[in-house]
Amino acid sequence: MQFIFNHTNLNVADLEKSLAFYKEALGLTPIREKEAADGSFKLVFLSDGVTDYMLELTWLRDHEGAYELGENESHICFHVEDYEAAHQKHQEMGCTCFENTKMGLYFIEDPDGYWFEIVPARR
């Protein structure tokens, strides 16, 4: 029996703000949506356009305020061919939240406080 990655879910407070962030920061685009008939939730699945793996954003109408992320030790990692250009873009966006130059990586933070690790494609 083999298990294959499918998607990761993140709850977001402002769906439109999050969609704009993921498009600008990581080039992710919506490929599928599902909305509850009563409007209580909306799911948007994002793709990198290369792999089958998806990021699912969940917006809950009745959730108020920010989500509790604990100590924020969980993260999703992306590798990128042009690491320097990506780093510059994220610096300009103001979303870089932690850098480890010795390890050659950095993290960006989305509007809800989720962290994403960025590493060069070849290390």
Image (tube, rainbow, N blue to C red):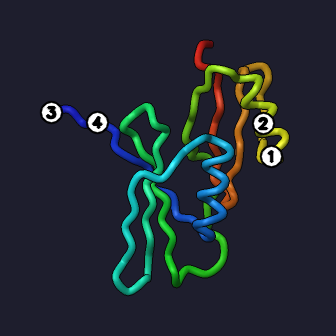
Task: Name the residue that disc number 4 marks.
Answer: 4
**Residue 38, how many percent across, how many down?**
38, 86
Mark 2 → mark 4, Cα distance in angstroms: 32 Å
Q: Is residue 107 above or below residue 43?
A: above
Quadrant (top left/top right/bottom left/bottom right) for the N terminus: top left
Q: Position of residue 76 (x, y in %)?
A: 55, 41
Q: Name the residue beneath numbered marker 3.
A: 1
In the rendering, at what x and y percent does residue 39 appear? 43, 83
Instruction: Pick the residue in front: 61 or 34.
Output: 34
* Residue in the picture at 52% in, 84% down: 62
Q: Earlier in the sequence, mark 2 or mark 3?
A: 3
- Badge 1 element: helix
Which amino acid lies under the numbered mark 2 shown in the image of this protein? Lys
Q: Quadrant of the C terminus?
A: top right
Find the distance from the CA under tag 1 to the CA under tag 2.
6 Å
Mark 4 or 1: in front is 1
| Camera-side mark, 2 or 4 | 2
20 displayed left or right of 95 = left
Q: Is residue 71 visible?
A: no
Look at label 4 and name its amino acid: Ile
Could you say which disc has been placed on residue 89 in the image?
A: 2
